[in-house]
Amino acid sequence: MTVRELFEKELSRFNKNQLESIVKSAIDEKLDHLTMANTIPKIVTELLNELESEQLKIIRFLIYLREFGPSTEIRGTAINYLGEWLGQPVLVQDPYTELVVFGDPFADRQSFRDKLKSLFNAQYNRALATKGPRYCGRSHSRILVRHVGQQIGVNVVYIDLLTSTVGEIIDQLVNEMQLTINKRDPLAQDATKTKDFLEKFRGISQNQFFPANTRCCIVFDHHDLPETLPSTREFAELMIKDQLENSLRNVWVVMLGLGTCTQISQVDISKMIAVDLLRIEPADIEAYINELHVKKNQQPMDPGALLKEKQKILDGLSLPLETLDSMTTMSARLHQYF
Amino acid sequence: MQLTISPEEVQKYIDSLQLDNATESSIDIDYQNAACVLYWFDPEELHPFSIEQGTILHTEKKGWYNFLRFCDPVPNRSSGNWWQLRPTIRRTAVQRLHEKDKVIQALDTNNNRGAFEEQKLYECVLRNQTIHINDMPRQMLVKLSSIVDWVTGILPGIDETSRQINRAIPMADLLMPMHRLANESFVGRKNELVQLAQYIGITPISSSAIQSATRFITQLFVSIDKNPPFLIYGPGGVGKSTLLAKFILDNTNSSDTEPLPFAYLDIDKAVIDLEWPESFVMEAASQLSTQCPEQSKRLIELKEELERHRWGFDSIEISKSYKPSASYAIPNFGIIVGSVKTPVLLVIDTFEEAQFLGEDVVDVVWKLLADLQKAAPNLRIVIAGRSQVKKSVIELHLTELSKDESRELLRKGLASLNMSDSNRDSIVDEIINMVGLNPMSLRLALTIVKDQGIDKLKKIETKTLFFIKLREEVVQARLYGRILAHIHDDEVKKLAYPGLIVRRINPEIILTVLSGPCKLEIKSIQQAEKLFNKLSDEASLMSQEEKSNALVHRSDVRKLMLEDLKSKVPAETIRSIHDLAIEFYSKKDDLISRTEEIYHRLSRGDDPKLIGSRWLNGVEPGLRTALEELPVDARIWLSGKLGVTPDSSLMKKAGLQKWEEIAARTAQRYLTNGDANKALQVMRERTERSPLSPLYRLELETLRVLGLYDEASFVAAEALAAVSGADSPAFTSVLLLQATLVKEGQGNLVEALEYIKETEKLLTDPPADILEALRIYVTHIRLLRKKGEAEDRERSLLIKKMIQLIRRKDDTDDINLNDLITKKKVLQVESSVLSSLRSNPALLQELVAESGKIVPGLLDNAIDWLGIDVQNNLQKDLLAKAFNEWNNELSSFSKSKFGELAERAGIKGEGVSVNDWYQFIADNTGQILTRNIQHWRREISVSDIKNQTINNFDKALVDIFRSNVDMSINKSVY
């Protein structure tokens, strides 16, 4: 996918009204002329065509989204697209070792990086699961998967099990992977919908003509939260089971926050690549600032200065870092070192 | 794309935008104040709220212009400009309002906020009003959970609500299947509910005025013999699970009384593994952890520990990961459950699945239950299955409903039909008169009456000429037959009958297999597809297969119908369907096709020996239901293949090789589950052995587990003599390796080395089986190491050979052990080898023990997959010293005062010592220790410390693996 296509894809996640609101905030214009009887992806394409015809407008739009975009992904894709416009494309050497991903810090997590690499290089058992306590950065890990996916040409579909129903998950997969699955019964029970979809999906992925541009990594998040519906949890588990048993071609599955499984046997669970995540520790922050410094200046930071910087970042935060507030503040403070 | 304007112009333009995401204007703060008390909002409709000035009316520009920088879109809404404040922004704003006591005023600012459920709930929280969690549907609990997250630590009294939600959501999930079973159509079973309550020692909720204090009758069940489990048995569909669901709902889901903690284990579910009964404990611990807050943490730890044990268990080299049954899990579970102050209900449903596999499986499960009962005297075990068990139990035979209960069931079922009460009552009595009082028969009859009318039901013969009611199964088959006959489309009717000779139907099967014998007018796949679609509309008849889009009959009813069909359909038609089906499936390679091919061959009466060549791993589950349909020979043959232990009378008829195959499965089961003596007993039921008997290896494993090395030595010699004329190098190799391990266990290294050298001679070049070759090499290397330094040269040569087998195929460099030791070269392991080692944990552990110091990839994966199992004080001491050295290195190098490692481990104070680390290890065994080691080895920058220190730490880990291997080989029974 091109940088523009990735940006379009992120913009297409909003509904028409939300998109109108974004455009109004960013460039103070209306979308009325585009929204008549069009689908969101078409509206987005036409919108970008229009903005690109007036170059300062697209730049303003991208800068606005880079600063205020309502998700890491939209900010990240805006950064990349803006880079292309300004003739400064974002260069990536090894996507797995990136310290700043989509404009956000990606600290600690060497094991996740290593295993993500193993996952994308694996012939069989292309499923990875992370486990760890709340606020250890399970969901945050998705941005590295997306980033790597973009760099190696794998379409990453992120599914939040917490906020989706089985029907919504299927719709999302069909849309984002552009699957040709027509016959869907909206009134069927979740278990039937799951079975039906996975059967068809298996058929599609095993088809030798399954197009290479549908290489896809499906990322499920929040499997382990009690709030997640059992039916959506089961959907994710059965998708993984399918991958482990049938080695679906061109498909990888990542489960961020694996909880108790009811559909996958222990033997199958043991086949998955497992990553245990721990909460970020002050020592990780220190190591991270140092790594950024090394990258910029080709030498480590002076130990005394490093200690001071660490204290500055952690100042006033409750330690250990295990609340959303402290994680967000810490993350925002790290931006100054990029 | 390319800009046609100059970079300077662009920069000027960017500067002019004055975007600064670090500053918030005061009006933004006012909007945040207003938005933070709304579940979601439309930014164009929002009025701001100022703490100082109250509501602010905007005249210039309506709505919140800068909202985007503070908000997330409300997901999954196809329309509407709905947004939510980001959680951290919201929390800051709520805090601000709360400090000034302005929350309610902010709420009143936007009176147009809507009265949707989520907003109402949020307002209850903001206004500190009581929320009735118990009556709340699951989806609202989830929303409440996010709401509570927004205000936790800010508003008072939230922690208790949070705790309640954390319990309520998993509880709602546990109870969801119960609600589905015991819904409003549940009738009767009053006596049965009372019997259950009496057994458990609980006063039924229905008996009024019972206070919590007297609700549970304290009685300790000390053993399964004195206090046997409660067995509910009866045919499928009679309502066993429904009865249990009703009981559980009555006793756990009331806000007025103390709930009864329960674990509901359905053997039919994937999470329960009959080959590994500790999965019962794992699942029970998981379910109880959501209901017993005080015990929750310990139950979760136990579950995780069991998971880890499962991952490390080697089903090929059982003796090396053998632990007597549930040596740690059951006592722990007992202690934890015993600390619950009420009885704890343990339900095992679908017990017939265990019985199906044979008495040995029932024995293993029963032993587990006995151990559990002994360990937790407040445990109440209730089992539900289709038949009686040959054990001491309190039986409740669940049969038909009473007449009144049947009437009530039918009245509820007919409530949707427009008819007078008297008419309905008369139909109800007619149905009962015809089909009796069995709930399943009544439900089938209800389907017919509702779809086709009472007259059609009357035409079904449910009684003999002498008005004696037919067997329940026959009545149900006929009722089902009536449903089949009701199919309007003649072609579909033919497809369903005699089409049910095949177990699965899709358009291809209709065209190729069924069209001829069923006399269907089908000539093309398009016609077949049309017919298939019509058949799929008959929802009561067929359901969609799990792994394909084929339709399958309901297996219970198909079984009943088959008997009927065989007497009514000409034998040549049935034969012809089998022939065509075999031809159809034999051309395909997938598992489902192979399963069906074997099924039709067995049904046709083919010689099982010939069928053996068509067998594939994975066809077993699909053939289990066929077992009962087959003649004796086929049944014995299939039993062996399925791991089902036939009853003793059938076993006696089995030939030697078939008996050995079945006995091996049974013995393996006992051995896997920690009962080596029983395994030996099974294998010694017959003394004769075929030359390549699978029992030789298993017997040697068992004897080694039991520490009976002399006897094992004798059996090994006998087995090697028997196999000498069989010309099977692979089999001989397995026995020689076993003989080696026996000698090693005896401490006789000289003879062990002789055996292993003989084994090595049988290896081909390159080896046919890499894992077997690795087993041989690693054993040889270990024996040489034990012999001492004099053997180091030979050991080095063998290590090179072993490395040759595991390293990446594209690595063709000469192997230089010194480079590997000094880390000049880091050897990568071939990924296919690594992935095979995952399912051979004993071998992986041995490889790490012998080469982990020079092949870090092996060590990394062993830590991930097997964990660091610190079993004794010597190992603790070793690891503590290694930690201390690492930490000293770190603290001398840099920033942290006490050392980065100590800081991460939470060890504080001047002069961190080996003793501190020893204590840290003692406090953090199992998964926690492993996680920390995994994390630290990867996250602490290698450039920070000397290679030697890392090497020393890794060496300590390898030494722990090494001593664990030695213990696994030289042990007797624990």
Image (spheres, coloured by chain):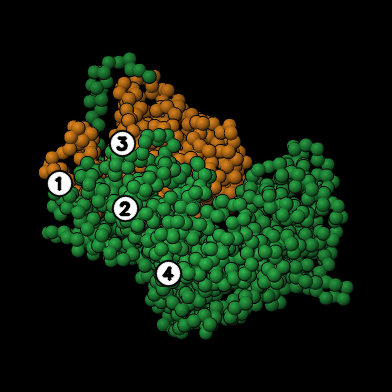
Chain colours: A orange, B green
Do the dots labelled 2 and 1 sit on one chain? yes
Label 4 crowd bin: few (<14), some (14–19), many (20+), radius 10 Å: some
Q: Earlier in the sequence, mark 2 or mark 1?
A: 2
Residue sitting at x 55%, y 36%: A179
Do the dots labelled 4 and 1 sit on one chain? yes
Residue B866 place in picture, x, y as percent = 39, 55
Label 1 crowd bin: few (<14), some (14–19), many (20+), radius 10 Å: some
Q: Label 2 vs label 1: CA separation?
A: 43 Å
Residue indicated by mark 3 = A98
| Residue type, label 2 | Ala
Q: Quadrant of residue B922?
A: bottom left
Which chain is disc 2 placed on? B
Labelled pair 4, 1 in contact (Cβ < 8 Å): no
| Residue type, label 4 | Ser
Residue indicated by mark 4 = B972
Residue indicated by mark 2 = B790
Residue indicated by mark 1 = B894
**Mark 1 secondary-structure assignment:** loop
Residue A55 place in picture, x, y as percent = 34, 20
Tag count: 4
Instruction: Determine the residue located farthest toward the right in the rendered image.
Output: B465
Q: Label 2 vs label 3: CA separation?
A: 50 Å
Q: Label 3 vs label 4: CA separation?
A: 52 Å
Residue B958 place in picture, x, y as percent = 32, 54
Q: Label 4 vs label 1: CA separation?
A: 48 Å
**Mark 4 secondary-structure assignment:** loop
| Residue type, label 1 | Ser
Q: Quadrant of residue B236?
A: bottom right
* In the foreground, B702 or A235: B702
Residue A43 can be seen in this image? yes
